[in-house]
Amino acid sequence: MKLYLNMPKSLYPYYKSELVKAKEYLEKGYMQQCWHHYERAHILGQRWPLQHSYVHWQMLKFGFRIKSTKEVFGQITRLVFGGVKSFVGTVPIGNTGGANVPPLKPMEIPEDLQTILDNTIKSEK
């Protein structure tokens, strides 16, 4: 069993960029665009406990901001279990992380993110 601890250094800028974009859209009140970038950050970070949990924390705060009980409760459970699943490498790859999708459902990864993951993870080996 492989334990996932640290996000590859070459992947981190892409993950961080998605979070920065989400924050910029949130500050402008563009909630749909903000959420889109949280989902993309989730896809990039879900294999690593710290980054995975951090995105769920941001999604939880977003749920409070938009006053969505479903999102708040969905994110609380994902915060409790998501990091553990990342640590042992059993995340549903491609899942976008929101309460609008089943938490254990693997999903297709957008082509640009798949390319980033393939290239950065390969370069770290």
Image (tube, helix red, strand yellow):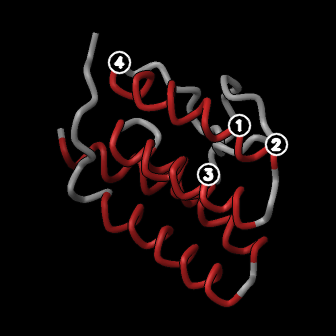
Which amino acid, by three-letter code, is at mark 4?
Val
- Is 105 above or below relative to 73? above
- Quadrant (top left/top right/bottom left/bottom right) for the C terminus: top left
Among numbered discs 3 and 2, the one appearing first in the sequence:
3
Q: CA distance from mark 3 to mark 1?
A: 8 Å
Which amino acid, by three-letter code, is at mark 2?
Lys
Query: Would residue 36 be visible to someone looking at this image?
Result: yes
Name the residue rendered at 25%, 59% in the picture: 10
Name the residue rendered at 64%, 41% in the picture: 75
Name the residue rendered at 58%, 27% in the picture: 92
Q: Which mark is residue 88?
A: 4
Q: Position of residue 24 (x, y in %)?
A: 56, 84
Which amino acid, by three-letter code, is at mark 1?
Gly
Q: CA distance from mark 4 to mark 1?
A: 21 Å
Q: Which mark is residue 40?
A: none
Q: CA distance from mark 2 to mark 1?
A: 6 Å
> Badge 3 local density, few (<14 within 10 Å), some, or many (20+)?
many
> Badge 1 local density, few (<14 within 10 Å), some, or many (20+)?
many
- Is 41 above or below relative to 94? below
Q: CA distance from mark 3 to mark 4?
A: 23 Å
- Quadrant (top left/top right/bottom left/bottom right) for the N terminus: top left
Q: Please tell me whether mark 4 sits on a helix, a strand or a loop.
A: loop
Q: Which residue corresponds to mark 2?
A: 70
Q: Which residue corresponds to mark 3?
A: 60
Which amino acid, by three-letter code, is at mark 3?
Leu
Judge from the rendering whether residue 80 lies leftward or rightward of residue 66; answer left or right.
left
Check contact, mark 4 vs mark 2: CB within 8 A. Answer: no
Name the residue rendered at 51%, 57% in the picture: 41
> Badge 2 local density, few (<14 within 10 Å), some, or many (20+)?
few
